[in-house]
Image (tube, rainbow, N blue to C red):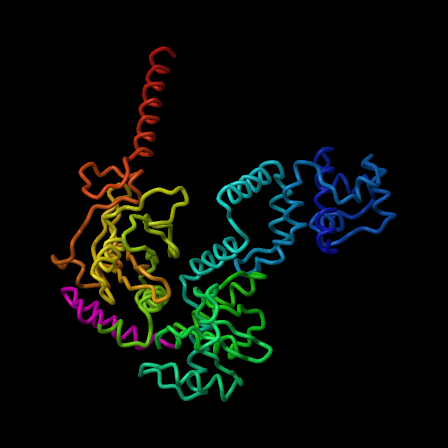
Amino acid sequence: MEEEYIKLIFGLKLKQIRTEKNLSLFGLSKLSGLSKSYLNEIEKGKKYPKPDKISMLSDKLEVPYDQMVSLKLDKNLAPIGDILKSKILKEIPLDLFGIQESTLIDIVSNAPAKVNAFISTIIEIAQNYNFSRESFYLASVRSFQQANHNYFEEIEQAVLKFAKAYQIDLTKPIDSDELKEILIEEYGYVFNETELDKHQALDSLRSVFVPKTKTLLLANQMDDAQRTFIYAKELAYNFLQYKERLYTFSWIKFENFDQVLNNFYASYFAGALILPKASITEKLTTLFEKDTFDEHLFLEILNSYNASPESFYQRLTNVLPKEFNIQDLFFLRFTHRAGSERFHLKKELHLSHQHSPRANETNEHYCRRWVSLRVLKTISSTKEDHVFDLQISDYPDDDMKYLLLSSATKDPFRDNQYRSISIGLLINKQLQRKIAFLDDPKIKTTKVGVTCERCAISDCEVRQAPPILLERKNKNAQIETVVADLQKRFG
């Protein structure tokens, strides 16, 4: 174990022994002759006492020396010991969230039984749901995005600096050739567009980068928008000088948290370069000022950039909170196989709070009234290139309504596979001030639930399963009411 963790474990043990003997720091100071501040630094894991001082503490506290210096923790502290030994706290930059490791350890040591029971519960839940290390990293990045309203000014400024340095006109659509030239001339890249297609096992990958020869292997069936995004990410890694990075797109595995975070930053850079903030803000302002929703104008804005619908909707989650102060929103990506009745929520982001449409890991049926699913059903049956729709989703149980815009496209890498990208905006006073077309009567309002198993809509024509979880909840509520009445009558 690292020296730092040995200090932390000794500090935890000393504090536990002191607490069990009902000694304050002041009391232990008087008993041992060591200063209160010195003992406090030991308990916080900042200092490790010399053998003679450990021997003296062992004698005064009546605890064997070997027990004092052992790295083995009793059952109350065992979970935090496992975490320290796993080095997971080293892999996650806690300072990113304004947390110091010593503060976290201090919280645990102040209530070891309760906090460690909580940690053990989280670990058990993660194991039951097969929550991998990669999933933990990705969840951490999502929390980081949400804490910053998914807007990062330093990356926005880096894009402007890059555009100026390489004379890229951000008022015009960027094509892949323009970025490819920079990768070749400035960073010495070599391109190969035939090798990946020879390997069936790599059919889900768009690109592989080989750092030793600076060779970028590309899947041949990509369109120009996909190539442009990949080139922009490669430029981000180089221009931002990220050493820890991923070498495949899409990712296969992460070695450490920095790779996950830098992958997010590189993707953010690519989106900001291809969909410049000033341009998209100006166009959205025109759209939002209209009294009725102009679908033609919306699609014209979407198609005015050399970007996929997913990149466009993702970029909205950066621009809307910053430029329009629309912060209560969510982003969803669903996948669907034609002919199937299953829909898989593969990606989600919630800003400000955990909004109603969210992923579930219990194999429940997502509400078929969601526009996100409706556009998938439409495109899988019509075989169109792009299907767009919108609705106002009314969640009666939460007393909330969302303006939901959704686009569906074919997955170019998988036969009969489709995906939908959606953005939902909570309808509140702020949204009503910013978007004039909310009262457009042509926008259909639909009552929706989260999953069929939890939905109270009784006359739903597209229900996939009975509301068994809701019925169970209602039955428990009835039992509680009857028991409360009995307690009152016979109490």
Task: Tell me where residue 419 sits by quadrant.
Answer: bottom left
Give the vertical position of 415 relative to 485 (above or below).
below
> Hey, which residue is sitting farthest top in the picture?
490
Q: Residue at x 75, y 56 (%)?
A: 3
Q: Residue at x 52, y 45 (%)?
A: 126
Q: Residue at x 37, y 51 (%)?
A: 353
Give the vertical position of 282 relative to 403 (above or below).
below
Give the vertical position of 320 relative to 358 (above or below).
below
| Residue 364: % across, % down | 35, 42
Task: Tell me where residue 54 sits by quadrant.
Answer: top right
Does the image show residue 428?
no
Quadrant showing the C terminus: top left
Is 190 situated left or right of 44 in this image?
Answer: left
| Residue 38: % across, % down | 76, 51
**Is 325 in the magenta?**
no
| Residue 480: % across, % down | 35, 23
Q: How many marks?
A: 0
| Residue 448: % across, % down | 24, 46
> Hey, which residue is sitting farthest left in the picture?
441
Task: Tell me where residue 428 sits by quadrant.
Answer: bottom left
Q: Which residues, given as a range, are shown in magenta?
A: 272-299
What secondary structure is the stretch in magenta mostly built from? helix
Is 405 situated left or right of 12 in this image?
Answer: left
Does the image show residue 142?
yes
**Is 281 in the magenta?**
yes
Q: Which is more toward the observer, 262 or 416?
A: 416
Q: Which is more toward the observer, 433 or 297?
A: 297
